[in-house]
Amino acid sequence: MLPDSSGAARDGIKRAIEMEQLRHFVAGASKALGLSVAFLTLMATGAMASVATPWQLGVPEPVSPVAERIHEFHDYLLWLITIITIFVLGLMIYVCIKFKASSNPNPSRTTHNTAIEIIWTVVPVIILAVVAVPSFKTLYYGDRTPDPDMTIKVTANQWYWSYEYPDAGVSFDSYMIPEAEIDPATQTYLLAVDNPLVVPVGKKIQILVTSNDVMHSFFLPSAVVQIYGMAGRTNETWMQIDKEGTIFGQCNQICGINHSAMPIAVTALSQDKYDAWLAEAKVKFAAAPARIRVADGAVNE
Ligand SMILES: [Cu+2]
């Protein structure tokens, strides 16, 4: 060691090394976080069926304009919170190292700084505003549609759904297919039903939901529809399924012992196929006697 090397010089070198290590750490952490966020975003927006699969990441693929907007809002918030979190983490690490007792033996006695106090009040207010504006827009967009193409009335029962097409005069019940009758090649137990709700693709459908008994909830994750069914009350929402195929949902309000036995299947068909189905349904369901479920669970077929 050189005779003139002072304690201050050693401290300076030590601090320089620490700052260099910090810069490396922050750069590495940002890169890792950026890659993770990109990966998760890719997984969340990738093509996925509406039935959950083992090890699936992310939420179901959106099938309606409301679902798409909500997914966009979700991704926007994810970027926003990621930036805020990285900024706060970076600030904390910087402060912990720069102002620790060994590198800052004579701490500042500052208690107020007007400029900083204004910044840390105004910036969060701006952040809340940029979250609130798209949030309310999406909320009101999904609430109801002013000019629906058709109406479907959904009535929840313990433990099945009744669907009614008031414009067409068609109504029928939709029951879960029991495990013993499931065809594993084409059906999924706890999701497959005997009579799915059938809708035309690309049409704005007003959905009115009520209940005949306890509280239920009509929940279709791929279309981001979730609305309570309550006896004596009619709740309104809407959906527009833009892809042909079947999506699934479930009652997601605990409604009694067979709560798990009231799945929802919605099949979206092109207008021609839907018209053909409707003509068939008018005949099929007109003649069918209403199924009555009695206390012991028996059903008259
Ligand atoms: Cu229910």
Image (spheres, rainbow, N blue to C red):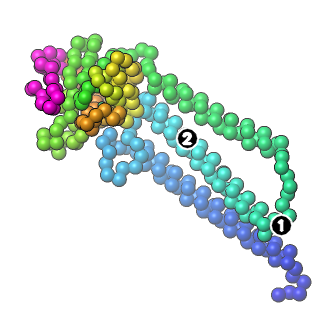
Left or right, residue 123 beside residue 216? right
For badge 2, the amino acid type reads Leu
Residue at 26% x, 26% y: name it. 157
Q: Quadrant of the C terminus?
A: top left
Residue segment shown in magenta: 281-301
Closest to the observer, 275 or 296:
296
Q: Which mark is residue 77?
A: 2
In this view, the residue farthest toward the left is 301
Residue at 64% x, 32% y: name it. 129
Q: Is residue 134 above or below residue 124?
A: above
Asked whether residue 181 is in view, the answer is yes
The image quarter containing residue 231 is: top left
Q: Quadrant of the N terminus?
A: bottom right
Principal secondary structure, stretch drawn in magenta: loop
Asked whether residue 240 is in view, the answer is no
Q: Which residue is mark 1?
A: 105
For badge 1, the amino acid type reads Pro
Is residue 290 one of those drawn in magenta? yes
Closest to the observer, 167 or 201:
167
Residue 64 in picture, x, y percent from top left: 39, 30
Q: Earlier in the sequence, mark 1 or mark 2?
A: 2
Q: Is residue 15 above or below residue 290?
A: below
Q: Secondary structure at mark 2?
A: helix
